[in-house]
Image (spheres, rainbow, N blue to C red):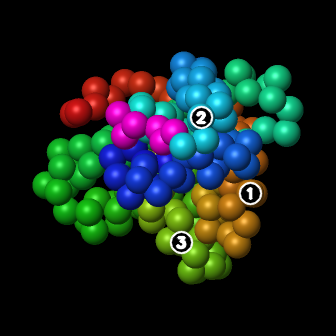
């Protein structure tokens, strides 16, 4: 929506999605958007100042058919997971992503009991390669139940499937996976 990128701010992307009923996850940002939209509605020539647009862009947005359920969402600091992986590559593999990815695949594959990658599709293997460095940072992965680990393997494969929806549904249903990612994101002290 423009956080850190002036082009979407200048072009009014935020108001385009607002008209489609997308709303900010952060309740404070959502209230600010409602107030600003009311000003726009009352003053046809009014344009939101860049400063206000920047504040409005600080939240992810979502769409829900039932607006009364909007307050149950909260933002997930996904960028922190990127920091976790970057630090992991730097600390463990001297910044070498290729070596880090390959070793992570081996380690996580062992911890999850993954065998027969040759029977996986190319996209499923790519998904595993991209997810493995993050999964390698889950400290108690081998303590998960057999069922939890098997579900995580299904999540990895779904990430490489043609339907992103399957990945999202499986991820949302795996409470231990979600909790592990939230813990990694929360514990990471962002460099910003």
Q: Nearer the viewer, mark 3 or mark 2?
A: 2
- Counting every numbered tag in the picture gives 3
Residue at the disc numbered 2: 43
Indicate the quadrant where residue 158 lies: bottom right
Q: In the depicted view, which residue is nearer to us: 51 or 189?
A: 51
Circle 2 Cα neighbour tier, 10 Å, few/some/many (<14 / 14–19 / ≥20): few
Q: Quadrant of the C terminus?
A: top left
The secondary structure type at the circle numbered 2 is loop
Residue 124 horizontal side relative to residue 163, left or right: left
**Residue farthest toward the left in the current orientation of the protein:** 94
- Front residue (pair 164, 57): 57
Q: Is residue 161 above or below residue 175?
A: below
Residue at 73% across, 49% down:
20
Distance, label 1 to label 3, CA atoms, is 18 Å
Quick check: 48 left or right of 33? left
Please indicate, yes or no, whether residue 149 appears anywhere in the rendered image.
no
CB-based contact (under 8 Å), mark 2 and mark 1: no
Q: Label 1 belongs to which residue?
A: 165
* Secondary element at image label 3: helix
Q: Is residue 78 magenta?
A: no
Residue placed at 58% from the left, 55% from the top?
Answer: 113
The spot of residue 83 in percent (x, y) is: 31, 42
Q: Residue 116's spot in the image, x, y percent?
A: 60, 73
Q: Is residue 49 magenta?
A: yes
Residue drawn at (74%, 57%), measured in percent from left and top?
Answer: 165
Q: Residues within 10 Å of mark 3 (few under 14, many from 20)?
A: some
Q: Secondary structure at mark 1?
A: helix
x%, y% of residue 142? 52, 38
Q: Quadrant of residue 37?
A: top right
Separation of residues labelled 3 and 2 (CA atoms): 54 Å
Q: Residue at x 18, y 49 (%)?
A: 90
Query: Magenta span covers which residues?
Result: 46-51
């Amino acid at each position: 929506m423009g956080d850190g990128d002036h082009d979407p701010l200048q072009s009014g992307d935020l108001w385009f999605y607002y008209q489609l009923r997308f709303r900010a996850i952060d309740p404070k940002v959502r209230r600010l958007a409602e107030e600003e939209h009311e000003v726009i509605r009352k003053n046809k020539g009014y344009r939101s100042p860049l400063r206000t647009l920047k504040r409005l862009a600080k939240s992810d947005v979502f769409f829900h058919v039932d607006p009364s359920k909007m307050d149950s969402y909260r933002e997930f600091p996904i960028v922190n997971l990127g920091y976790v992986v970057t630090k992991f590559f730097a600390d463990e593999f001297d910044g070498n992503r290729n070596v880090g990815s390959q070793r992570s695949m081996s380690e996580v594959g062992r911890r999850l009991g993954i065998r027969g990658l040759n029977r996986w599709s190319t996209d499923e293997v790519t998904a595993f390669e991209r997810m493995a460095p993050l999964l390698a940072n889950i400290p108690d992965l081998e303590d998960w139940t057999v069922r939890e680990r098997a579900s995580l393997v299904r999540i990895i494969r779904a990430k490489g499937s043609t339907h992103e929806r399957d990945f999202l549904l499986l991820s949302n249903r795996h409470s231990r996976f979600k909790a592990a990612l939230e813990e990694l994101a929360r514990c990471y002290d962002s460099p910003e």
